[in-house]
Image: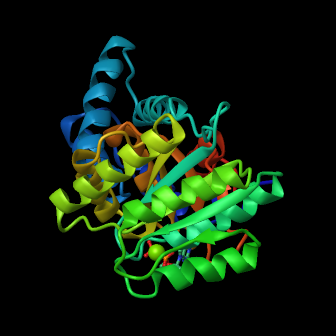
Amino acid sequence: MFKKWIKGFKKTKDNLQEKLTALITGYKGLEDDFYDDLEEILITSDMGVATSMNLIEKLKVTVKAKRLETPAEALAQLKEEMTAILEKNDGALKYNSDSLTIWVVVGVNGVGKTTSIGKLAHEQKANGKKVFLAAADTFRAGAIDQLKVWGERVGVPVIAHQEGGDPGAVVFDSIESAKAKGADLLIIDTAGRLHNKDNLMEEMKKIGRIIEKVNGGPADEILLVLDGGTGQNAIAQGEAFNEALSGLTGLIITKLDGTAKGGVIIPLINQLSIPVKLVGIGEGIDDLEQFSASDFLEGLLGEED
Ligand SMILES: Nc1nc2c(ncn2[C@@H]2O[C@H](COP(=O)(O)OP(=O)(O)O)[C@@H](O)[C@H]2O)c(=O)[nH]1
Ligand SMILES: [Mg+2]
């Protein structure tokens, strides 16, 4: 039985498989046009230009080395290449065994940071963790209240100051408070002001310094949230954040419910070299799941429906 979110990939899969089947029947041998068409299929399936080109280049080399001759053989080889990309994905969330575990969540407005934090808090609490939340997005109107609503819903404390306040001060207070109350995990919501990279970088550096100072080490996770429904835009955003911030440890890909753009997970893992850790599959409290590369592959490329 597939998890709910894998079923959501059916659109992506049907789309991709239909095109690949047409390719197999359309070509007898592996001429240049075959590779051009295949590259186009990959690009239009949200694999990204760089990753698609990369996959095709590798495929050509392997086809030669293994003396493959038919489109069907080449496509089987392509699946292996995609598997290799996904298999390097380590989706486990990291905890601090010595001190308070701190996860910082970053990303632009509207991608689903606050919602993902609420869901994550719920899941971690259900796993027996004592969770605190920090409202360090003091920039966006309503962001603090939104996190407080989630805190009440889940039943976890939210440390907050006023709107427009200093995010660093919120982080400082939240760590002190979480430690004093014996919390296991603190999840920090931030404002993703990517349009002002220097500002974002300064703010994140400051938050990093405070965590380091008050907790005796860096954050255990810096999770970048990307809206999977935006396809190529998610890749561009991921690259921009990865350039602007050092030390991203994982991705949360949201809004994968009902999108045909799930293929974007492959270039994200390949091009950013950051593991996908969680996927958002709806607006409800339980609509966040650990990413499983093998389930994803089966959902995307498997033979079964
Ligand atoms: N369908 C769907 N909607 C989501 C998901 N995650 C977040 N949202 C919605 O996206 C909108 C923006 O989310 P929010 O958490 O406020 O984004 P933030 O600005 O990054 O904190 C809200 O309406 C959420 O309910 C998801 O996985 N699926
Ligand atoms: Mg928010």
| Residue under the point 41% across and 40% down | 274
**Residue 242 position in % (x across, y down):** 29, 46
| Residue under the point 50% across and 80% down | 144
Query: Front-most of 265 and 197?
Result: 197
Left or right for 67, reference 156: left
> Where 284 sits versus 252, above or below?
below
> Where 226 sits versus 296, above or below?
below
Q: Which residue lies furthest to the top in this view?
A: 65
In which quadrant of the rendered image does the N terminus lie?
bottom right
> Where 133 sits versus 102, above or below?
below
Q: Which colour scheme is used?
A: rainbow
Q: Is residue 253 visible?
A: no
**Residue 158 position in % (x across, y down):** 62, 71
| Residue under the point 19% across and 68% down | 195
| Residue under the point 52% across and 35% down | 89
Q: Quadrant of residue 258?
A: bottom right
**Residue 193 position in % (x across, y down):** 27, 68
Query: Front-most of 74 and 240?
Result: 240
The count of marks equals 0
Query: Front-most of 255 and 64?
Result: 255
